Image: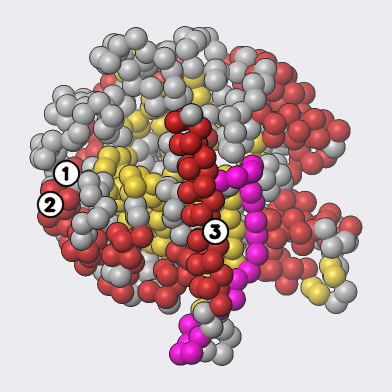
Amino acid sequence: MPSLVVQDRATAELATRSSLAATTPAAKAEKRSRRKSSLKTFFLPVTTKSPVVVSPEGTTVVGSLPEDIVREIVDRLQPNDILSFSLTSTHLRRLLLPALYDTVVLKSSRACRTALLMFREKRYLCRYIRKLAVRPNYYLAWPKPDDYLEEEWVAEMLIGLSDDLTVLNTFDWDALELPPDRLWDSLSKRCPTLKSISTNIGRKNLDPDSSLFQFRGLTSFSLIARHGLPSTSELLPIPEDLPDAFWDMILNRCPDLEELAICTFSPTTRLFDIDRIMEVSEGTLSEFLEGHKGLKYLRFLWNFRHFMSPDSIVFTLPSNSLPALTTFIGIYQQLANTPNPQTIETLDLTCEPIYQSRMTAVCSILRGLPNLTSLEIWVHLFDSDSDHTHFFHSIMEACPKLTDFHFMCTNSFTAKPLKQLLSGLYLLPELKRFSLTKGHKYFDEPMLETAMKVVRQAPKVKQVNLRWARERCPNHLKQEGSYDVVCHEETGMPCALNVVEKGIALVGGPFFRQYQHTFNLGIGQSTEWQKTVSQRTRVVRKRVSSMLSIRQLALTE
């Protein structure tokens, strides 16, 4: 196997549940694309790159515009824009169908019901689908909890469409339980190009004779115990054995396997025994890693809800292991003795929150990664009124080559620490994408104002992503926005933001808006937008104060 992904229960030396993962550079690029294109409807592709576009007539597309120019244009468009582009003419619509339906993600029961009924009426569209994700009863549905949909019906609809899924390459089932076995049987017989399968499992036991384990020639396979499985104990369950047919498929019938994921998001309910993987390399994790030198992606999960990680972990690897590792997800202690830190370009430290008391150790690790260009980090602030400038600046000073920086702080994050954080962006001269996730407060400034502050502090940034989290909101999402920077053709300075925002308003229902905001960063720039924002903020505060006063009066009476 050129590369491998494994997610597993804890090893004794780590004293926790952990997971190991590896994948190809293409998956890494796809992950970045998914992060960038987070607001998609069910009929739009996840990635912005379109498949090969073939003109139905083999000539021109719009007037005298050659089709290769159209292809270049489409490759640079966001999915929503591809849809709008396709609606300009019937001919162009036919031309862009492969791009529109290359990837179909049905992210709710409603999307499943609507899309599957449409595909049943327009079966020809199924012939363009290469990647299909089906998520009925989705736990991350937004802005309200998902409606219940009979999963048996979803499976039957897919079986009925399988004859037309002739180019399907990737299938993802993300539901409450495994689908009926006849769906896997149908896909294996009628979808000859299917090479990647991912499925959730719930409470039901795995059938050792399931058709799910009868595929051949797969390049990617994921078996995941879903979120939210009920448990009556905080203790770890006994790891359950995976069927022999599963191991036979993975080890014998899929010689070109590049990615394997076996993991659980309900570790107190279901864990899997993956000792057969370790047997391939004589039984130890170190020997396994040493024997797979092509690993580029390594992921360890840490369940911080049960206990925080210790200050140090014994995790020693041979000096010649992981020579190609570029992406690491886990806790910083596991990087203390990484044999080839110079190869790591992407680091994700969002498995658990990092406290200020550990920042010296974290920064030491970051400074030891000389080629780090992408960082995601989760911090916890005990007192938002304190001065955290040194805390924030230490992180950025330790990794000055960052081009992609995601800072997450899920507790209350007021204007004062926000100003202190943004004041350090000058320490990242190559920064192209900045993302901020923080706890929401009703007196927060508008997201547009925050995005503008980022652009003023880091004029070279190309994209700003903001996410305000609130525990009681569906998917913990109060509101989020994506802001693409538009630069002036002559000066190269930022002059506008292409804005996409969605959220749940203080009064009223969910909102979605898309617009362009223009501005001038030069001397003597207009401050009208600042005045408008300030006025709106005062209005919101007055309304909230009035609502609280009325409520308090009602309680006293």
Instruction: Check the picture and name the quadrant holding the N terminus.
Output: top left
The residue to which callout 2 is attached is 361
Task: Indicate yes or no whether the magenta region holds residue 471.
Answer: no
Whether tag 2 and tag 1 are in contact, CB under 8 A, the answer is: yes
Residue segment shown in magenta:
506-525
In percent of the image, x 36 and y 41: which residue is there?
22
**Residue 333 - label:** 1
Mark 1: amino acid:
Gln
> Quick check: 459 above or below 127?
below
* Residue pointed to by mark 3: 539
Residue at figure coordinates x 52%, y 89% from the top left: 491
Does residue 220 lie above or below 329 as drawn? above
Distance from Cα at disc 2 to Cα at disc 3: 45 Å
Residue 224 sits in quarter? top left
Tag 3 or tag 2, which sits nearer the N-term? 2
Whole-percent x, y for residue 70 in the image: 74, 68
Image coordinates of residue 96 in percent, x first then y, are 77, 56
